Image (tube, rainbow, N blue to C red):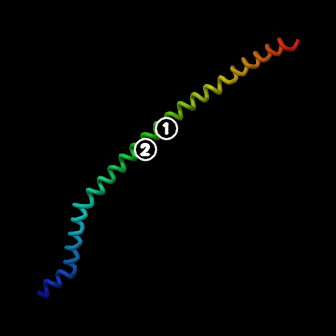
Amino acid sequence: MEAFITAVTGPLGALALSVGILWWLATRLVPVLQAYLESQAESLRNMVTALEKTVTAHERDRKMFEAAISQLDTRLDRVESDIHTIKNKLVP
């Protein structure tokens, strides 16, 4: 009986306890962690998709802004000529 108690409380007992804890972790905790990590990966995928959409929309807005700025000079020329015409009619 003393040999059994020594084996249980000694290195053999610690090894058996460690194997038991690792087995419990593998069967109970790993599936929970796997589900959590998969849900986090899905959330990250959704955020990346939203970020890509934002970048694409920003690129379209930037092109429209550049087009509007490049046409501003033409529009100002027309306003200047209209003002010049009005001034010539009002001031003899």
Residue 72 location, x and y as percent? 68, 24
Q: Is residue 16 above or below residue 48?
A: below
Q: Is residue 25 left or right of residue 65?
A: left
State the image coordinates of residue 68 (x, y, percent, origin top left).
Answer: 62, 26
Neighbourhood count class around disc 2 (C-alpha, 10 Å): few under 14, some 14–19, many 20 upward: few
Q: Quadrant of the N terminus?
A: bottom left
Q: Quadrant of residue 80?
A: top right
The earlier-in-sequence mark between 1 and 2 is 2
Q: Residue at x 84, y 14 (%)?
A: 90
Q: Position of residue 16 (x, y in %)?
A: 19, 73
Q: Secondary structure at mark 2?
A: helix
Q: Is residue 79 rendered to the left or right of residue 49?
A: right
Quarter of the image that includes the C terminus:
top right
The 10 Å Cα crowd at callout 1, few under 14, some 14 to 19, many 20 or more, is few
Q: Nearer the viewer, residue 38 or 89?
A: 89
State which quadrant residue 66 falls in.
Answer: top right
Q: From the viewer's side, name the closer residue of 80 and 92.
A: 92
Q: Amino acid at mark 1?
A: Thr
- Residue 12 vertical placement versus 52 (above, below): below
Q: Residue at x 27, y 59 (%)?
A: 30
Report the number of numbered marks. Answer: 2
Badge 1 vs badge 2, beta-carbon distance below 8 Å: no
Q: Element at badge 1?
A: helix
As drawn, the label of residue 47 is: 2
Left or right: where 80 falls relative to 10? right
Query: Residue most toward the bottom?
Result: 2
Q: Is residue 65 above or below residue 32?
A: above
Say which mark, if any, is on residue 54: 1
Q: Position of residue 64 (x, y in %)?
A: 57, 27
**Residue shown at the point (27%, 61%) measured from the top left:** 29
14 vs 67: above or below: below
- Quadrant location of residue 8? bottom left
